[in-house]
Image: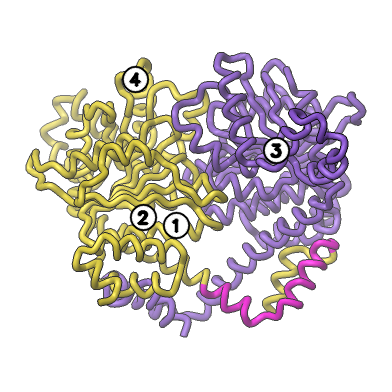
Chain colours: A purple, B yellow
Amino acid sequence: MTLAQEILAGSRLALARLLSQIENGTPQGRAGLADLFPYTGRAHLIGVTGAPGTGKSSLVNALAQRYRQPGDGMASRRVGIVAVDPSSPFTGGAILGDRVRMRDLAGDPGVFIRSMASRGSLGGLAAATSGVVQALDAAGFEVVLIETVGAGQAEVDIARLAHTTLVIEAPGLGDDIQAIKAGILEIADVLVINKADRPGVETTERALKSMLALAHPVAHVFRDVRSTVPGAQAESHIQDEKKVESLWVPPVCKTVAIEGIGIGELTLAIQQHLGHLKQTGELALRERSRLQAELEGLLRDVLVARWRMALSDGKYEEMLQRMLERQVSPWQAVEELIA
Amino acid sequence: MTLAQEILAGSRLALARLLSQIENGTPQGRAGLADLFPYTGRAHLIGVTGAPGTGKSSLVNALAQRYRQPGDGMASRRVGIVAVDPSSPFTGGAILGDRVRMRDLAGDPGVFIRSMASRGSLGGLAAATSGVVQALDAAGFEVVLIETVGAGQAEVDIARLAHTTLVIEAPGLGDDIQAIKAGILEIADVLVINKADRPGVETTERALKSMLALAHPVAHVFRDVRSTVPGAQAESHIQDEKKVESLWVPPVCKTVAIEGIGIGELTLAIQQHLGHLKQTGELALRERSRLQAELEGLLRDVLVARWRMALSDGKYEEMLQRMLERQVSPWQAVEELIA
């Protein structure tokens, strides 16, 4: 049996082996992914991101535990967790909440956890993460939680892998956190205020909601019309509903992950978002742009590698030397090398 | 006169224009950079990064003000500030401490400030930042402060542009800040604990120093030998000194940026690091790897663009469709497209 066949037959050991090969970018890893690719596209991919100190790992664990239990009209689901830490580019060790995770989820055969740290380029990490997520999807994990720390471009790239992205906040996290929110808000499908038993939760909620109002003005204007001008409601109601339906305004959920508070409501919000994606056809669009991004990343790597192999080392070194001596600019160097 | 000639003659307006063209990736921007490239390589490039809430913007302002004043054996220097915010990938608006900056530095002709937000890809941001820094360098700004928010791969990539990288911490910034430090510590040339008048500063300092001891074991062992075994000192002293000299153990500086406390000591530490780079020959090595990274980034973009132009849109779309239908995996698609 190939590794892929073993994985499809349910072997965790084979899965762990393939994930290592994918992370290391080996030919076996690529072959395994090619075998598994026809079985992908079934999992609900959920991205979880936010600044340090928001309690992401605890929240991911609480979500995983919730998905394992049947209830609220949902069957128990198999859960994959991919914890990506782009802030460890050199150490190679992934440390994101591993201890908490071990305690809460160890020993459950319906849960598979993989920690990843960036090795070399960010592009490499995004590609490896995409491969790991595909393998978990093909292996039958119905929910894949992709956890990243921080709020930079790395997180945005990884969020693009997900169907539904949760952005986690917590009350009272420093002065210029607002600057972060402005950027990260645009990738959020569901906003979560974790540690909601802490002081300052009302301030955080108010800030998030006013930023949402700025980001989604149309939806909020429609809501205002309906709530403040009752006479106009009957006439414009149906038309407005249709427009609002095609918009998704991220709901704000409050949780205390370590006590399991608010997790049921959060999973419902996630489910509603998936429903919205399916209903509006956006799921297919996201799937398409996801695969396109992956294709382009791979193409880029392969094209550069092929070109470098065709070029003599001497030519390249000589050009670098001329750049160091300020004889040619980087752009001139590129033009000469490619010509 | 070309834009480059106007910039070399001291025109701020011409500089602002070229920076916009560089940011937008226009042919004029590339031409201007090519003209200016022979005049680059003179500025001391200082990266400043750290988590939100550490007071980076205030620290950058305090450093800029210090560099503007002669004293401690240093002449007044012209200062460029490039504030990069990779967490705003969609908005296009850079907001990083702009208000604070306006108040402290506006109207000083020896200071030039440029705020940048990521537009599209991270690679694009790094390339644009590199171009902006080169233009400021050629325009005669002797110190260029490159400020980034956060601690992800984006910051690491941007830190690679700098000769000296400061990593800013502050006391009491949440629970899993340690995870961040582990990765970011490896790019730090100077560590700064800002807001050092806050409670918890001793804890932060102790944590940083013990992490430094782990990261630089050799240097610390040598220091231990000398301080605890006085008999062995005379013999091994010279040999140890030589080994220690070629190592740089990041000093830990404490500052209260908004009150200007500790800024003189910090600029001295930065100066010592530059001296170390020059003495050990590492400055030339960093310059080389910086230019090499830039060359490779440009090559990648150009190669992919050329390849895409040679390929028919139909072929590409067809392959994407086959991927969506799970008929070919991304790797198989790349192989077929390139063949």
In contact (CB < 8 Å): disc 4 and disc 1: no
Q: CA distance from mark 4 to mark 1?
A: 33 Å
Q: CA distance from mark 1 to mark 2?
A: 9 Å
Q: Nearer the viewer, residue A138 or B310?
A: B310
Q: Is disc 2 on the same chain as disc 1? A: yes
Q: Which residue is mark 2?
A: B161
Q: CA distance from mark 2 to mark 3?
A: 45 Å
Disc on res. B201: 4
| Mark 4 or mark 1, whichever is nearer to me | 1
In contact (CB < 8 Å): disc 2 and disc 3: no
- Identified at 49% across, 43% down, the residue is B152
Dot 1 or dot 2: first in sequence order is 1
| Mark 3 or mark 1, whichever is nearer to me | 3
Q: Provide the chain ID for the residue under circle 2.
A: B
**Badge 3: residue crowd in 10 Å (few <14, some 14–19, many ≥20):** few
Above or below residue A100? Residue B147 is: below
Which amino acid is tagged 1? Ala
**Badge 4: residue crowd in 10 Å (few <14, some 14–19, many ≥20):** some
Q: Is disc 1 on the same chain as disc 3? A: no
Q: For residue B323: magenta?
A: yes
Which amino acid is tagged 4? Val
Above or below residue A268? Residue B183 is: below
Determine the secondary structure under disc 3: helix
Q: Name the chief secondary structure element in magenta.
A: helix
Q: Which residue is mark 3?
A: A221
- Identified at 69% across, 29% down, the residue is A252
Q: Is disc 2 on the same chain as disc 4? A: yes
Q: Which residue is mark 1?
A: B126
Which segment is the magenta one?
Answer: B302-326
